[in-house]
Amino acid sequence: MRWSVPALASAGLAACGARPEAPAPVAAPWLEEAAAAAGIDFVHRSGHQEGRFLLPEIVAGGVALLDADDDGALDLYLVQAGGLGVPEAERPANALYQNRGDGTFVDVSAASGTDDRGFGMGVATGDADGDGRIDLYVTNHGPNRLFRNLGGGRFEDATAAAGVGHPGLGSSAAFDDLDRDGDLDLFVVNYLVWSPATERECFDAFGARDYCAPAHYGAPATAVLYRNEGAGTFRDVSRESGIAARAGPGLGVACADFTGDGLRDVFVANDGRPNHLWVNQGELTFEERGLALGCALDQDGVPKAGMGVATGDVDEDGELDLLIGNLRREGDSLFLAREGHFTDGTARAGLGLVTRGFTRFGLGLVDLDCDGTLDLYQANGRVSREENRHGSADPFAEPNLLLRGLPGGRFEEVLPRGGTAALLVHTSRGAAFGDLDGDGGLEVVVANRDAAPYVLRNVHPDRGHWLLVRVRDEAGRDALGSVLTLRAGSRTWRREVRTAIGYASASDPRVHFGLGADADVDELEVRWVDGIRESFQVEGVDRRIEVRRGHGRPAR
Amino acid sequence: MARGSERERRVLTRALAVTVLLHAACAPSGDRAGLLGDARLGAAPELGPLDGLEPEAVTLLQELAAELATVSEHSEPWRELGAALHAHGRSAPARTCYQQALLRAPDDARAWYWLALLEETEDPERCLRLLGQCAQRAPDYAPARWRGGYLLLAADRLAEAEAAFRAALASAPEDEAAAVGLARVRLQAGQAGEAARLLEEHVRRVPQDRHALTLLGTALRELGRDAEAERALAGGAGAEPLQHDPWREELLARRRGARADFLRAMELLERGDVDAALPMLEALHGRDSRDVLVLVALHRAYRMQGDLERALTLLIEARDLEPNSEVVHLHLAGACRERARRDGGAPERAWLERALASSERACELAPTHAAAVAMHADVLADLGRTAEALAGWKRAAELEPGAAAWQEKAGYGLCRAGRWGEAVPHLRRLDALVARSPQNLLTLAAALANSGELDEAAVTLERARALAPGDPAIQKAIQDLARSRSDATGGPR
């Protein structure tokens, strides 16, 4: 029903609510949306029906970039939801698109065996069975699924055999060798203890129906830690590891050695509650130390609505920093690592104000212009209905943000907003990063709720030199968790081998370095998960290389 | 400091802050006219679609718009319509109305302030300039200053932020948000020592500001004072910042509709004003007898008034309407426990069994709902199932480390069971949450001593003695500990 008061005739009627406009941007776009041109015809369906607001609908949406068929080109996996009230067999399925090698794709979902019809939330990638092929782990509302890569782009559902079908409301997940025994364990973050039967009726401040905030349920979930027992099997060690001792509405995850003791830790971003930093005590046991180490709350001492998590050496001091995307009206949380603890560096980095107008989910610290400094891409979309100021009929839609990294660990927004010539406005969720067309520039693929994804081709007009490094262990598997240090001229870069980046998504495991004007690499050092270091010769830049454990020189 | 010079200092500080904010306001695109866009004196705007608003809200907006149409040359009707639109999430027409109000009455500080609030999220730079205009006209309204101060902190403009907080304190020396803001400036500037000093002073002056403890903990951690930091952080867990902003409250009070009424009634209940809340809740119940949230709130109000029978009836109604709400089952368990004890003497078992069934159902529905787990433990304890109760309190304390009640129950219960080592972390956290409790310190010391941590036990007892110097139990404990330590070392006492 529409209500309005007719406008009265007047002379010199004022402009309605006009604000002074910012000067028109003049920079060239960095990114170009090309999903349709690339052959991606996937459309996400949350299943939302007007009048019924089911929580998972508003937080679902992951994407993965992986070389599913081992042909050297990144393929694309998109997670579908499909509707909670719809029988599983009738839901649209997750989709796998095979890269033809030139950044265009063909739908191979049905033939691949990955066309899962669970209510999909997110996806993680890693070589679960150690056979050298990258596998897929899909988090669902309901049992999660592990798809084992059989080679040739074919997968089989290995969930039951592996023992990893946790039936909660999964969000993000990450494969990582947490016990340093040479195989990948699996850390699964759960959001809430939730079912349609326990859904609440919530309203916005003006009385209209809306999604509930996690605090309304009072039912935070515990994460699940699966220890890889070998031969593609896992054991749930959540209780004995200590992970099950604390619950939180977990959405984002990042694994790294955050304390500098050589052991892999796990950071979980919690929505509206203090974040968790699970500090590895050895023997796959963990102690939660987020509050004590300074990454649980922001500098105002307030827990934020943590969603996506990115890691990177933002201030180039050799330590790994944490960046968490939060809710509208909350700036990002940039936690700078400082010798075993963290300090909130959000404001100093220029992220305190520019980000607070948006609700950030997917994000990544990646060097899109290859100038040697990490940039920041944020995929945005609201979780509650508000007046939409971006010209979209979708009350949850927002534009995404692209921020250029500056020396000294600061950021400035790139205009046009989001880095594309035309403003793109959807309810974005997960984002994955990787070089889809082999030209050294990183592309961004963004999952959008109830819409087609963005496939954002990197069209930066003046990209610097680059290097793309595949890091494999002695058995030929991606060495997740290894730390690379690259030196060129007077600069040093630190990057990690990881796939879990951002929110409920997985990126290319190959490590990308933007080198700016540096055309010669002096040294590339790899610190393997067990602490052993090797040094590798790199001949030339602007190329893809592979380093394998045992083929370098021992480094001190 | 002499009063005359104090007054001068305040005037100078205020002048500096106004200058800073004016400078911000006079940034390249920001004079007063620029802040109002290209607005010109005009007539009433279209309200736009009012979909999703409740009938009371629509009626209010239409009435205000109709009134405005008759007196559009005056500023106040514009401001009132703007505030009502703003309160109901209609930003664009609200902005127009504020602009029109300000064109007619440029010195309307509230209108500047509310316009600033409208821009706070979308355009913080503009918000700062608008706050500057407000501060010019209402120099004693502290929130206009500290709100700008927090935006300036987020922008890392520390000198300006400091000036803003000092100006707020000059006119409102007791303002918690400004005091804490000043400490935040020091913290962000890397001056953790000074930040800690300011926060310690503030916490002494305003012990109810637990949020400041979290900031203090952050500062102490930067200084390497890790043990104190952990205690402060634990003490501040879950606390919200204290920010009193009457003009913002005035704005929100313009919301109309059942939702707004419900929120208002809940605020009254939280403040203990049952007499005011009850008729509001009954009216809401009359509008929609199937609203479970209202039923639960109404039950609370009746319980607070002592009418347990009515409260129970309402909860049972709520449970029948929403059998899968752990919140309803949780409250039902609590009400049944209370009913079990109503007549004095031993609790009635039948009511305890009902409480048990409800608490079990709550835990089944939400196994990580800390309050449900704790309630279940309470009921188990009532029924004499002590070991299970203890396990429940421990679990609740793990799930919600910031809840002092469950840390206390877990800690004390474990002590009574002789499980000293397990009790220690709970009692440490309790000490952090409930500072300055000699009894808690005494219990913690006992647990530490029985766990072999004699040195820490001794320090803890000294803290207890400092709080209660003449307490014989503490004195005795100190003597017993000294004897134990001497026996252990074989040395003199």
Image (tube, helix red, strand yellow):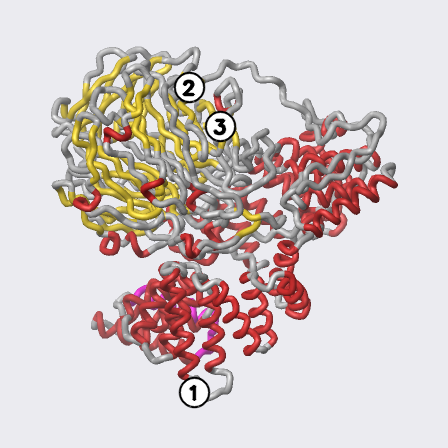
Q: Amino acid at mark 2?
A: Ala
Residue type at mark 3: give it.
Answer: Leu
Q: Where does the image place residue B273, in percent across and percent down from the top left? A: 65, 67
Residue sitting nearer the eye, A148 or B456 = A148
> Nearer the viewer's eye, disc 3 or disc 2?
2
Instruction: Kindly indicate whether the residue at mark 1 contacts the one at mark 2 (C-beta within 8 angstroms).
Output: no
Specify start and end residues of the magenta stretch as a single range: B454-471
- Please give the residue where the numbered disc 3 appears in the rendered image: A401
Q: Is residue B289 above or below residue A244?
A: below
Q: Position of residue B326 (x, y in %)?
A: 44, 63
Mark 3 and mark 2 residues within 8 Å of each other at the beta carbon: no
Calculate the distance from the C-alpha at mark 2 to the C-alpha at mark 1. 74 Å
Inter-mark Cα distance, 1 to 3: 64 Å
Across and down, in percent, residue B14 comes to 72, 41
Q: How many marks?
A: 3
Tell me: A217 left or right of B18.
Answer: left
Q: Is residue A113 visible?
A: yes
Q: Is A143 displayed left or right of B324 in the figure?
A: left
Q: Amino acid at mark 1?
A: Ala
Q: Are marks 1 and 3 on the same chain?
A: no
Above or below for A38 versus A236: above
Report which residue position mark 2 lands on: A34
Question: What chain does mark 1 sit on?
Answer: B
Which quadrant would residue B80 be assigned to in this image?
Answer: top right
- What predominant SS class does the magenta segment belong to? helix
Residue found 52% across the figure and 69% down from its top: B317
